[in-house]
Amino acid sequence: MHKHPTEAPQKAPPPPPSPAAHDTKKLIPSQGARYVTLLYPLIFFFLFITILVSSLNYETVPWNFFPFPSAKPSNSRVAICLVGGARRFELTGPSIFEHVLNVFPEADLFVHSNLDENSFKLGLLRLAPRVTEMRIRRPVMLPETQLQKRVLTKSFSPNGIQGLLQYFDLVEGCLDMIREQESQGRFKYDWIVRTRVDGYWTGPLDLEAFKPGSYVVPEGCRFGGLNDRLGIGDRNASEAALSRLSLLPRLDEAGFRDLDSETAFRAQLIVSNIPPVELRFPFCILSDRQYDYPPGRFGVPVTSMGSPGPLSGAKCRPCTVVCKGECMAEVGPRVNEMWGWTEWRNGSMELCNGSQPWEEGWEKIFDNVAGKVAAIVRRRVKNMKFDECVKEMDGLRRKVERWNGPDSAEICNLALSNTQSRTRKLPV
Ligand SMILES: *[C@@H]1O[C@H](CO)[C@@H](O)[C@H](O)[C@H]1NC(C)=O
Ligand SMILES: *[C@@H]1O[C@H](CO)[C@@H](O)[C@H](O)[C@H]1NC(C)=O
Ligand SMILES: *[C@@H]1O[C@H](CO)[C@@H](O)[C@H](O)[C@H]1NC(C)=O
């Protein structure tokens, strides 16, 4: 049977991006200590801004007040892929800024998402350190080939293999964007971070996750394969990990059948000789889906987004906790190790009863857990008007290097023509 190799063939691994102090080098050109004097006005300027900002009422603060970056990449080049629907991006966005994008402010960001009534929330990205390309594509049915039907299974996915193909296409599209950027600039990225629009982060993406020659994924939620909710790898490993559609013929040749997302992902790494490494990461997938409570052997635990964590990519929502501590010691061991399992033993995980839609009053729970800035963003997006939305999308479009999507008015119209805001008078 297929086995993971323990070691990858490895040539000249790219150095992991380090939280280097390269910024000072930029401020102080090599030949002059006299430039140091230039720093003083700068420092005073920052102090002034800081005092100005903190003296304002929180509600009037420009809500793009995100914490300053805590680390900067070294000279290795990092690409970040952000893929998936923007359904709850007003809730996850601020956490992605703080713990992923601002940690690697020099990384190039590539976004791939389907056009729907939530796409306008991606306007938040105008505050990202940089956005290289955005693709917001109109949903289309993808053709299903005999080969795909043979290799993939329609169980587990709400829309059969079409759902899988759509998801794979979103992920692989990111690799296409990256290749295009590379061929235009005649360089290769050293690292690719693949993450999801619906990821809610509670701590920074750790530099430990950059391991040459292997592909790093979150521990737990394997569903018989490998957790595919986040991935970090060097250029070579990422090529294998992100080639979700184009590797299917290789999987077919190797005799793989009836794969779902997680088992296909594992198979991809096997045929490519890339060893996976599982680490725990401080994020969860903010999900509206409902799952039986308590979770059974092959169930999916719905965790509280306020759990101490790290939740390592488990499903989560804002909720009143129904199970922790002793209760977890009872429920935890019931979930199968190779299935929906996530580490619960040291109090990191608290559960919601996820059998119903999000509870009444979840907003308050979210605001308490996520903090002031996130609460401001949440309210702002909720109350957004058409012209504000257009202004924001226009801002984003000016910022991105390559925009691949409909114009702002179309995106905002889609959003604000739903029932909740139909009553609003919209300028056309
Ligand atoms: C890149 O990955 C392939 C498998 O996809 C492997 O055979 C090759 O040795 C790797 N090259 C480097 C430089 O790591
Ligand atoms: C649980 O253990 C993990 C891994 O050792 C650690 O990172 C985490 O902080 C712990 N969580 C709690 C709540 O103690
Ligand atoms: C979970 O919630 C459902 C719906 O509110 C309820 O019927 C059920 O009893 C709850 N389960 C437990 C174990 O509390």
Image (cartoon, rainbow, N blue to C red):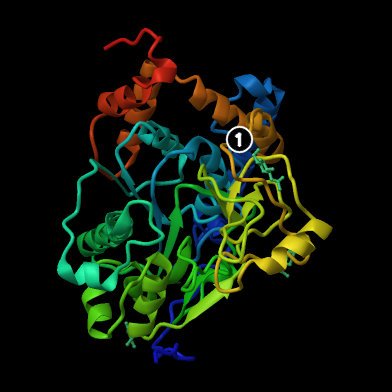
Mark 1 CB in 8 Å range of ligand 2?
A: no
Image coordinates for residue 206, horizontal then vertical, percent: 59, 64
Q: Is residue 359 above or below residue 259?
A: above
Q: Quadrant of residue 419?
A: top left
Nearer to us in this view, 252 or 8: 252
Closer to us: 270 or 303: 303
Does residue 137 appear to the left or right of 80 in the view shown? left
**Looking at the figure, which quarter contains the N terminus?**
bottom left
According to the image, label 1 marks what residue? 374
Between residue 252 and residue 92, name the one nearer to us. 252
Q: Is residue 182 above or below residue 210?
A: above
Q: Which residue is drawn at the image coordinates 27% and 55% (left, top)?
A: 162
For mark 1, give the secondary structure. helix
| Residue lying at 30% horizontally and 67% vertically, measured from the top left | 244
Of the residues shown, which amino acid type is indicated by label 1?
A: Ala
Image spot of residue 173 (x, y percent)? 27, 57
Provide residue 391's location: percent of width, then percent of height: 36, 23
Within the image, what quadrant is residue 390 found in? Answer: top left
Residue density around tag 1, few if under 14, some if 14–19, many if 20 or more, within 10 Å = many
